């Protein structure tokens, strides 16, 4: 029989090994290559990928995710991306279903936009990119994302000015 101390030592060893693997993965690739079924990790990877692909400043993309669904980084194990707002915006980036029609020229089921993290974030990135080409100002883009009008409101000011977006992230502390 193993003593509780031996079991605890083994468990701590496995946790530290997993954390080292995750840190090494981030340093090497910029992405967390672990279980993609964890919503907060999938969010992190998609936000990183599509901010690069669509040339969206990372702090703005992460701030929008925080403002829309309180996303708090890859270790936010309690993160719930399957939300619907009182006005009908869905998913991790709280997109209105009409945005998908505008981006893809076809309707996408609301349930898919709500539950498919990658589709929701990619659609959001395409929408933000399209808005930036139209307005040429990230403040107006963020205001439009929030209200449907190219205004600079508190939401937009927060999204563009908070460059320390990681300060809101859940930290792993051992």
Image: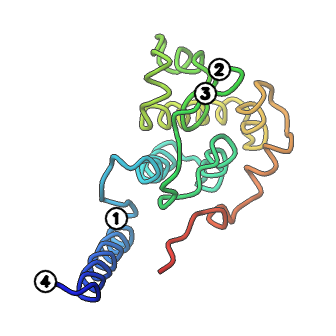
Q: Does residue 46 lie above or below 131 as drawn?
A: below
Describe the element under mark 1 as helix, strand or loop.
helix
C-alpha span from label 1 to label 4: 42 Å
Element type at mark 3: loop
Q: Which mark is residue 88?
A: 2
For label 1, the crowd category at 10 Å Cα-Cα, with few meaning under 14, some 14 to 19 and many 20 or more, is: few
Q: Which mark is residue 53?
A: none
Please name whichever residue, 6 or 38, is drawn nearer the observer in this view of the structure: 6
Q: Position of residue 117 (x, y in %)?
A: 44, 37
Which residue position holds label 4?
A: 1
Of all residues, the one furthest to the left in this rendering is: 1
Q: Residue at x 47, y 51 (%)?
A: 40
Q: Which residue is tagged 1?
A: 29
Question: Residue 13 is drawn in which quadrant?
Answer: bottom left
Residue 60 located left or right of residue 77: right
- Please report contact status of discs 2 and 3: CB closer than 8 Å, yes or no: yes
Q: Residue 163 or 80: which is nearer the viewer?
A: 80
| Secondary structure of residue under mark 4 | loop
Residue 58, quarter of picture: bottom right
The answer to whether the residue labelled 4 contacts the one labelled 3, judged by CB atoms less than 8 Å apart, is no
Classify mark 4: residues with Cα within 10 Å, few (<14), some (14-19) or many (20+).
few
* 97, 150: nearer the viewer: 97
Give the mark toward the camera: 4 or 2.
4
Q: CA distance from mark 1 to mark 2?
A: 36 Å
């Amino acid at each position: 029989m193993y003593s509780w101390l031996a079991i605890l030592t083994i468990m701590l060893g496995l946790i530290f090994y997993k954390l080292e693997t995750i840190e090494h993965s981030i340093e090497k690739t910029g992405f967390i290559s672990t279980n993609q079924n964890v919503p907060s990790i999938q969010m992190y990877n998609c936000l990183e990928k599509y901010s690069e692909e669509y040339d969206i400043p990372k702090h703005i993309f992460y701030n929008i995710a925080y403002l829309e669904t309180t996303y708090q980084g890859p270790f936010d194990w309690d993160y719930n991306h399957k939300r619907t707002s009182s006005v009908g915006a869905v998913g991790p980036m709280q997109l209105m279903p009409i945005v998908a029609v505008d981006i893809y020229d076809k309707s996408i089921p609301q349930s898919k936009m709500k539950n498919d993290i990658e589709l929701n974030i990619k659609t959001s990135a395409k929408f933000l990119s399209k808005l930036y080409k139209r307005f040429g100002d990230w403040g107006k883009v963020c205001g439009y994302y929030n209200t449907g009008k190219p205004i600079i409101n508190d939401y937009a000011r927060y999204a563009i000015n908070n460059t320390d977006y990681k300060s809101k992230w859940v930290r792993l502390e051992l």
